[in-house]
Image (cartoon, rainbow, N blue to C red):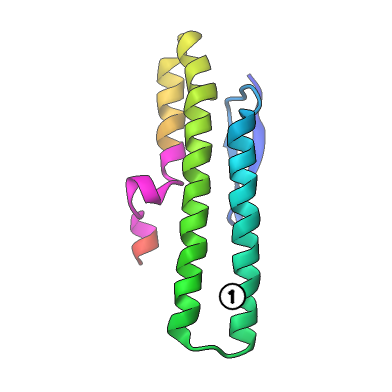
Amino acid sequence: MTVVPTPRGVGYSTAVLQCRPMKDEHKKAALNRLKTARGHVNAVIQMIEAERYCTDVMKQVSAVQGSLEKVNRILLNNHVETCVMEAVQEDRVEQIVDELMETLRYTPGITGPTEEALL
């Protein structure tokens, strides 16, 4: 069993499971969306520096959030197709269910916002 620290907010999360690399199509899709989001973030920064109308900036921020949620869906899809399937095949069902439930905490587009996000 491999322990891999992954950055998360201020602290760190510890992923206990390690599986095969991402599928090429998921990696390509995630990277493309992230690069697009990066471009949108740069545009938002320029809009704020230019003191553009607040609602226009908010629309762009919403577009960035949507792009990032799509990246999360791609990552979740990859995780289920690779790591989860591997764990099920190895009869580590309880372990993978716990880890999958933890993973779903980071996909509010699928599971809805957390209580902390609503505060």
User: At 62% from the left edge and 74% from the top edge, which residue is drawn?
Assistant: 43
Q: Is residue 102 above or below residue 66?
A: above
Residue 82: % across, % down: 54, 23
- Quarter of the image for the N terminus: give it: top right
The residue indicated by pointer 1 is 44
Q: Is residue 43 left or right of residue 64?
A: right
Q: Which amino acid is tagged 1?
A: Val
- Quarter of the image for the C terminus: give it: bottom left
**Nearer the observer, 21 or 50:** 50
Q: Is residue 53 above or below residue 27?
A: below
Label 1 neighbour load within 10 Å: few <14, some 14-19, many 20+: many
Toward which corner of the image does residue 35 lie, by quadrant?
bottom right
Q: Which residues are magenta?
A: 103-116
User: At 60% from the left edge and 33% from the top edge, which residue is drawn?
Assistant: 25
Toward which corner of the image does residue 30 lie, by quadrant?
top right
Toward which corner of the image does residue 16 lie, by quadrant?
top right
Q: Is residue 27 left or right of residue 59?
A: right
Question: Is residue 112 part of the magenta span, yes or no?
Answer: yes
In the displayed image of the protein, which residue is found farthest to the top? 90
Question: Is residue 68 part of the magenta span, yes or no?
Answer: no
Residue 106: % across, % down: 46, 46
**Label 1: element kind:** helix
